């Protein structure tokens, strides 16, 4: 699972210092962009090659508020990949203070989303995810219940 740390700034919050609900979408987008970058793919270069990734749909669940000045983490986990798209689970989490072994005591899920992303060409038509990109996007095996 990919993790991208963020800090909550005043611009992210409402008048009460709570992260405005729409800003979680920005947090998710930033994490996806940084995740692609860590895989070796710059979105500007992909766009120059006629490849674009767009959100096709998403569902989001808000669980607890993030607050001004908090350090939070946004995660990305691929759960499925098709020829022209992928499904991602994303979370915004808060870790508690570390214990004596420097291990996180617990994680609080603040928001979670299932995001379906499509690969399109410069005209907006669906296209296959390029081979070198598809090779790097591997779904995480899901636990059997």
Image (cartoon, rainbow, N blue to C red):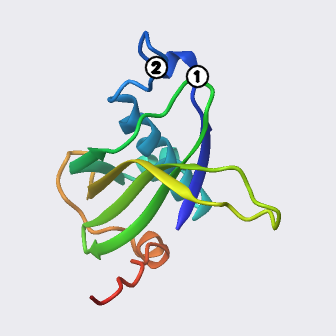
Residue nearest the observer in this picture, 110 or 138 = 110
Residue nearest the observer in this picture, 30 or 82 = 30
Q: So how many labels did they put on this image?
A: 2
Q: Position of residue 1 (x, y in %)?
A: 52, 68
User: What separation in Å lies between label 2 and label 1 (alpha carbons)?
Assistant: 7 Å
CB-based contact (under 8 Å), mark 2 and mark 1 = yes
The quadrant in which residue 107 appears is bottom right
Q: Is residue 69 visible?
A: yes
**Quadrant in the picture for the C terminus:** bottom left
Residue nearest the observer in this picture, 40 or 59 = 59
Task: Examine the rendered structure and indicate whether residue 3 appears above or below residue 10.
Answer: below
**Residue occupied by mark 1:** 9
For image coordinates 38% across by 24% down, the residue present is: 20
For image coordinates 41% across by 74% down, the residue present is: 134
- Categorize mark 1 by other alpha carbons within 10 Å: few (<14), some (14-19), many (20+): some
Q: Position of residue 127 (x, y in %)?
A: 23, 63
| 54 horizontally vs 12: left or right | left
Q: Position of residue 52 (x, y in %)?
A: 34, 50
For image coordinates 34% across by 44% down, the residue present is: 63
Q: Is residue 41 visible?
A: no
Task: Examine the rendered structure and indicate whether residue 140 appears above or below residue 121.
Answer: below
Q: Which mark is residue 90?
A: none
Q: Which mark is residue 13?
A: 2
For image coordinates 26% across by 47% down, the residue present is: 60
Task: Examine the rendered structure and indicate whether residue 52 appears above or below residue 15.
Answer: below
Badge 2 marks a residue whose secondary structure is: loop
């Amino acid at each position: 699972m990919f993790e991208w740390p963020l800090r909550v700034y005043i611009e992210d919050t409402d008048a009460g210092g709570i992260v405005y609900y729409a800003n979680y979408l920005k947090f998710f987008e930033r994490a996806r962009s940084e995740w692609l970058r860590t895989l070796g793919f710059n979105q500007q270069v992909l766009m120059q090659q006629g490849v674009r990734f767009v959100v096709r749909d998403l569902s989001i669940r808000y669980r607890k508020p993030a607050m001004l000045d908090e350090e939070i983490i946004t995660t990305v986990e691929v759960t499925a990949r098709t020829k022209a798209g992928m499904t991602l689970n994303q979370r915004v989490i808060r870790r508690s203070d570390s214990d004596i072994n420097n291990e996180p005591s617990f994680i609080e899920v603040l928001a979670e989303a299932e995001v379906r992303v499509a690969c399109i060409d410069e005209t907006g038509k669906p296209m296959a995810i390029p081979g070198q990109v598809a090779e790097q996007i591997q779904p995480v095996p899901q636990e059997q219940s």
